[in-house]
Image (cartoon, rainbow, N blue to C red):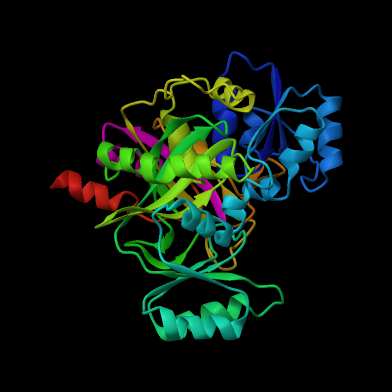
């Protein structure tokens, strides 16, 4: 089977690495890919926003299956166009991808299906937002832009001036919409399932680190590192998440005529009163995908094919290594603001000689030199018997990378390391 992978980030590099291990694979193609993905796939320059061009590419290269990596093409309806052209796809429809594309859509689903989540109000103008902030919420308060924001559209406003600045930024352009939410206290965790719209299999847990600085300080980013599994999401809590959040979501989406097929990524807050849904993502996380793929011991392509075929009924959950995987994002200086581009990157072979895997995200080749194209650039991923060991292995590899214009947090996994040390 010839497979096409869409996307160019660290998530897609991890997917390409895992898909390339499938005995079902004849050839792997990527649009647009990156230099790391090119180690496993033939990369092509086709605009993902041009659905007809992507379909024409698939026909020209006898593509038998398409894997959509990032969220934007899903929300744009590319999977619908491909399926209409007779091409099987791993990834939800445009209607189902609203679970990520619209915060308000997801909150309204939670209200209809009695899914535990933070209290909220949807607003679509500045005056209403100000009135709601003054009347219905204390501080801190959570303010979310209602749309795709690459993991950076959320403000946890601790003070009044932060809250006012966040809503002003959302409504400075016409058509802005926002969700204002109750602030939840607890520890965050991520839980994944693969679903064909009716049935599902669990696909592991992880814990991301969104803040740019050590000790979870500074602005939110798309993610500065992650580890899997997340021991804080105990088997009992996982069972509760499945019963109160996952099952009602899958059933509610099907009941509404928008069945969800693909990976369903639940961002959770583990509160004193139980797990609550923060948000859904309609794709594998980045960098959560990297740690999940490092632990996965099954044929990813087979699982994706079964999902699209609607044949997950009776399937066992895929096997994962008992080891912990931990990834550290190396970002360009200036991220998440204006990142410094063009910095040379070396030492990847030395980093991988330690046993780690370096997944590339914001990179390109300038002649024979690998350079940063900005934002999150590399995700350096390693494994160990526990979080402490995986963290040590990952930072050994980070220290072998030569990236003078980059930086990384030095404390990924810090909560679990503290727990392991007692």
Q: Is residue 88 magenta?
A: no
Question: Quick check: can you spot residue 278?
Answer: yes
Residue appearing at x 43%, y 37% in the figure: 291
Residue 382 percent coordinates (x, y): 39, 36
**Is 174 left or right of 304, judged from the image as shown?**
right
Pick out the residue farthest to the left: 422
Residue appearing at x 57%, y 51% in the figure: 99
Q: Nearer the viewer, residue 98 or 143?
A: 98
Q: Is residue 386 magenta?
A: yes
Question: Quick check: can you spot residue 227?
Answer: no
**Is 126 left or right of 133, judged from the image as shown?**
right
Q: Nearer the viewer, residue 133 or 217?
A: 133
The image shows residue 106, relative to residue 244, as above or below, that is: below
Give the quarter of the figure containing the N terminus: top right
Residue 47 percent coordinates (x, y): 80, 45
Give the image quarter of residue 273: bottom left
**Is 39 left or right of 120, judged from the image as shown?**
right
- Span highlighted in magenta in the image: 375-397
């Amino acid at each position: 089977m010839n497979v096409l992978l869409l996307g160019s980030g660290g998530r897609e590099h991890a997917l390409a690495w895992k898909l390339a291990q499938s005995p079902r694979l004849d050839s792997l193609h990527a649009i647009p890919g990156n230099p790391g993905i090119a180690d496993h796939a033939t990369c092509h320059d086709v605009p993902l926003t041009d659905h007809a061009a992507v379909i024409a590419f698939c026909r020209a290269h006898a593509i038998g299956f398409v894997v959509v990596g990032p969220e934007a093409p899903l929300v744009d309806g590319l999977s619908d166009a491909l399926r209409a052209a007779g091409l099987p796809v791993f990834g939800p429809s445009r209607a189902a991808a609203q679970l990520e594309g619209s915060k308000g859509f997801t909150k309204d689903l939670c209200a209809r299906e009695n899914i535990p989540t933070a209290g909220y109000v949807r607003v679509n103008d500045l005056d209403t937002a100000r009135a709601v902030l003054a009347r219905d919420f204390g501080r801190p308060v959570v303010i979310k832009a209602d749309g795709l924001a690459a993991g950076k559209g959320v403000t946890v406003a601790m003070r009044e001036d932060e809250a006012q600045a966040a809503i002003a930024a959302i409504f400075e352009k016409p058509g802005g919409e926002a969700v204002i939410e109750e602030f939840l206290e607890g520890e965050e965790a991520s839980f994944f399932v693969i679903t064909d719209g009716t049935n599902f299999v669990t696909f592991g847990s992880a814990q991301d680190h969104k803040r740019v600085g050590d000790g979870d300080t500074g602005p939110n980013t798309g993610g500065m590192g992650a580890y899997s599994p997340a021991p804080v999401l105990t088997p009992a809590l996982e069972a509760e998440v499945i019963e109160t959040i996952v099952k009602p979501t899958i059933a509610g989406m099907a009941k509404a005529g928008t069945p969800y097929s693909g990976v369903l990524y639940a961002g959770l807050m583990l509160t004193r009163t139980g797990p609550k849904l923060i948000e859904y993502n309609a794709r594998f996380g980045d960098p959560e995908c990297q740690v999940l793929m490092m632990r996965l011991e099954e044929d990813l392509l087979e699982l994706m094919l079964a999902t699209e075929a609607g044949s997950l009924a009776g399937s066992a959950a895929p096997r994962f290594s008992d080891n912990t995987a931990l990834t550290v994002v190396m970002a360009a200086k200036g991220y998440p603001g204006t990142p410094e581009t063009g910095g040379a990157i070396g030492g990847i072979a030395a980093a991988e000689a330690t046993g780690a895997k370096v997944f590339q995200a914001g990179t390109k080749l300038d002649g024979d030199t690998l350079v940063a194209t900005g934002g999150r650039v590399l995700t350096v991923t390693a494994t160990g018997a526990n979080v402490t060991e995986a963290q040590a292995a990952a930072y050994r590899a980070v220290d072998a990378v030569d990236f003078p214009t980059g930086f990384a947090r030095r404390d990924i996994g810090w909560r679990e390391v503290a727990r392991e040390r007692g």
